[in-house]
Image: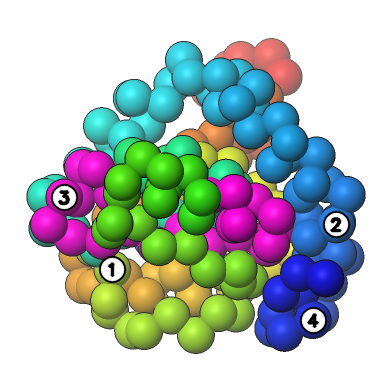
C-alpha cells in the first residue's frame, strides 16, 4: 500500500486521488519516458518562461515523475524545488530518478495541492506542466498556490493546444471554434 491512506485529500478530489494513486499512476510511472518525450517540444520553452533563478524556491504542482521538478532544481542550484502529486507511484519514481541523477535539492511529496498546507509566502515560483488541469476546484487550488507564493512570485502553467484558458476568446477575436 502507498501513502494514500495518510494522504489528506479534498473530498472533491477523492476520485482523482484513487485513480492517480492506483492503476492510472502506475501506468504513468511505468511509461514516464514516453510521456516526457511527448511534451519535449515545449519543455525548454516552458522552463525558460518560468524564469527560475539560481536561489529560487520552486513549487511544481502535479509533478508526476518529476522531470520538471528535477530541471527546476538544476536551474535553482542554490535553491530548492518541491514537486507534489497525488500519485505515490510517480512520487516514488521521481525520488529515485532525482537520487540517481544526484539532484540533492529536489524534494517530492505526495499531496493534494488544492488543500495542502504549504508554508505561506515560501516559494518564488510555482510551475505546472499538466497537473493543474485535474483540479476539482480550480479557484480553491489556485488560491492555495497563490498563498504559498511570496509577494511578487511567478506562476508558470503550461497548457496544450487543445486546452483553452478562455473558451470564448476565439469567438471574441473572430476565430471559429
The residue at which mark 3 appears reads as 77
Tell me if residue 68 comes above or below residue 149 in the rendering.
above
- In the visual, does 53 lie left or right of 18? left
Tell me if residue 121 comes above or below residue 91 in the rendering.
below
Mark positioned earlier in the residue sequence (1 or 2): 2
**Secondary structure under badge 1?**
strand
Crowd rating for badge 3 (residues with CA inside 10 Å; few <14, some 14–19, many 20+): many
Nearer the viewer's eye, disc 1 or disc 2? Answer: 2
Point out residue 44 in the picture as x, y percentages from the top left corner.
Answer: 34, 24
Give the residues in magenta: 72-94
Which residue is depicted at the point 19% across and 50% down? 76
Query: Gap in Å between the C-alphas at discs 1 and 4?
Result: 27 Å
The residue at which mark 2 appears reads as 22
Mark positioned earlier in the residue sequence (3 or 4): 4
Task: Name the residue nearer the viewer: 167 or 174.
Answer: 167
Crowd rating for badge 1 (residues with CA inside 10 Å; few <14, some 14–19, many 20+): many
Mark positioned earlier in the residue sequence (1 or 4): 4
Task: Name the residue nearer the viewer: 144 or 47.
Answer: 47
Residue 5's disc is 4
- In the visual, does 127 lie left or right of 61? left
Q: Quadrant of residue 4?
A: bottom right
Crowd rating for badge 4 (residues with CA inside 10 Å; few <14, some 14–19, many 20+): few
Whether residue 161 can be seen here: no
Residue 63 in the magenta stretch? The answer is no
Which residue is depicted at the point 69% across and 14% down? 176
Give the total number of marks visible in the rendering.
4
Q: Quadrant of residue 177?
A: top right
Point out residue 43 in the picture as x, y percentages from the top left corner.
Answer: 42, 26
Mark positioned earlier in the residue sequence (1 or 3): 3
Mark positioned earlier in the residue sequence (2 or 4): 4
Query: Gap in Å between the C-alphas at discs 2 and 4?
Result: 12 Å
Amino acid at each position: 500500500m502507498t501513502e494514500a491512506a495518510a494522504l489528506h485529500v479534498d473530498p472533491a478530489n477523492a476520485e482523482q486521488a484513487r485513480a492517480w494513486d492506483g492503476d492510472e499512476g502506475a501506468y504513468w510511472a511505468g511509461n514516464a519516458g514516453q510521456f516526457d518525450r511527448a511534451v519535449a517540444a515545449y519543455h525548454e520553452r516552458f522552463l525558460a518562461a518560468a524564469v527560475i533563478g539560481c536561489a529560487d524556491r520552486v513549487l511544481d504542482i502535479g509533478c508526476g515523475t518529476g522531470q520538471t521538478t528535477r530541471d527546476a532544481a538544476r536551474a535553482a542550484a542554490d535553491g530548492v524545488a518541491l514537486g507534489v502529486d497525488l500519485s505515490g507511484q510517480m512520487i516514488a519514481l521521481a525520488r529515485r530518478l532525482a537520487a540517481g541523477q544526484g539532484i540533492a535539492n529536489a524534494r517530492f511529496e505526495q499531496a493534494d495541492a488544492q488543500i495542502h498546507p504549504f508554508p505561506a509566502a515560501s516559494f518564488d515560483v510555482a510551475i505546472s506542466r499538466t497537473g493543474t488541469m485535474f483540479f476539482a476546484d480550480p479557484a480553491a487550488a489556485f488560491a492555495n498556490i497563490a498563498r504559498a507564493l511570496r509577494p511578487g512570485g511567478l506562476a508558470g502553467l503550461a497548457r496544450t493546444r487543445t486546452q483553452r484558458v478562455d473558451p470564448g476568446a476565439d469567438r471574441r477575436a473572430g476565430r471559429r471554434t
